Image: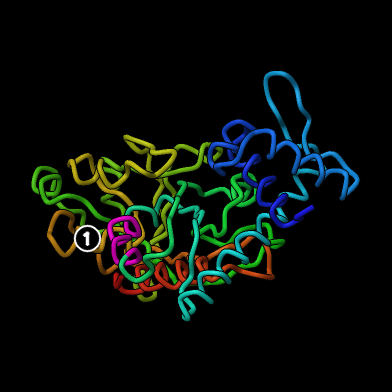
Amino acid sequence: MDKLRAIKFFCGVVEAKSFVAAAHNLDVPPSVLSKAIAGLERDIDFRLFNRTTRRVSLTDNGANYYERCKRLVVELEEAEVVTRDHDARPVGKLLAGLHPAVNRTVMTRIRHFFAAYPTIQVETTLSSTIATLIEDKLDVLITVGNPADSNYARQKIGTGRFILVASPEYLRSRGEPHQPSDLVEHQIVISARRDAPSYARWKLTKGSLSETVFITPRAVSRESVHLHDACLGGAGISRVLDFSVRDHLKRGDLKPVLADWALGTAPVNALYPSRKNIPAKARAFVNFVRGVVRDGAP
C-alpha cells in the first residue's frame, strides 16, 4: 500500500465530507478511494470514519489522526514547491481568523499580500474567540487584547491606541465635546461582546488628570463589524483602535474627538495552534499584518 497516497486520500475525504465528492476532487474512481482508506485503516489498526448510508463522520481517533496528517500533507506540498521552484516561497491555503477591529484594515490591503505571495490562497473568518483557532482548524488567529488561555503559541505583533472619533457631519450638528464629561450629552456607539454590559465606562487621562465617564450608548455593535459604518453615517461618537480608522482620518471621513486625552492601548497578537512547525504561509501573513497595524504599510 502507498501509505502517503492513502493519507492524502483520507484528508481529501475529511475536507470534502464525502467519499464521492473527494473522489471527484482527487480525480480517482470511488472504488480506488475506498480501497485506499480501508487499507490505511488496516495498517493503523483503528477506524477513521463512522459510515452510514447517508453520511460519513470522523471517529475520535480519526479526528486526532487528521490533525497530524494534514500538517504532514501541507509541509510536503510546501517542500515540493520550494524544491521545484528553487526558492523558499510560502505556498498553500492559509486559514486565518481576524479580530473585527483588524479585519477591515487588513482586507483593504490584502492585494499587497497577494502580490508578494502569489502561491498562497487566503481564507479568512471573522473571530474574536480563541476557541475558533481549533474549531475552525485555523493556521493563525489575529486577536486584540491579552487572551486568558495561554495554551497556544502567542506572538505580539503590535499595539493599538484607543481614540474617539466621529464624522464631521455629526460634530457640526451636535457640537464637539471639550472635556470628557461632555460625552454624556452625545450619542455614543460602542462595540461589546454578547456577554458584556450594554454601557460604556471610559477612563480618559491627560497628564496628571484622570476622569472616568459612564455612558448609556444609543447603539451597541456586538460583532464590531458595523461600528465604522455607524460612525461614518453620522450616528455618533465611538471609541476605536487608531489603526482601524487611519485611512478615514487621512481622508477626513472621520475626525478625532478629545484628541488630547488618552484612552489606553491594546496589544495585537498572533495565536497559533501549536508552538512547533508554524507554517511559512502563516509567518508570512503575520509579518504582513504587523506592517498594517504598525504604520498601515502593506
Magenta segment, prevailing SS (helix, strand or loop): helix
Q: What percent of the width, then of the height, locates residue 200?
A: 42, 45
Placement of the C terminus among the 4 image quadrants = bottom left
**Image x and y of residue 149, in percent:** 68, 57
Q: Position of residue 74 (x, y in %)?
A: 60, 61
Residue 63 belongs to magenta span: no
Q: Nearer the viewer, residue 201 or 134?
A: 134
In the image shown, does 240 or 243 lie closer to the viewer? 243
Dot 1 alpha-carbon crowd within 10 angstroms: few under 14, some 14 to 19, many 20 or more: many
Write the residue at 28% across / 47% down: 228
Specify the farthest residue to the top.
53
Residue 137: percent from left, percent from top: 61, 50
90 sits left or right of 205 in the view: right
Q: Is residue 271 left or right of residue 105?
A: right
Vertical placement of 111 versus 290: above or below?
above
Q: Which residue is mark 1?
A: 256
Residue under the point 32% across and 41% down: 226
Left or right: 192 as drawn, with respect to 76? left
Is residue 283 positioned above or below 71 on the image?
below
The tally of labels here is: 1
Query: Residue 224 appears in which quarter of the rendering?
Result: top left
Residue lying furthest bottom: 86
Against 284, is 10 above or below?
above
Magenta range: 105-114
- Residue at 82 percent of width and 44 percent of height: 39
**Residue 107 in magenta?**
yes
Comparing 218 with 11, the one in front is 11
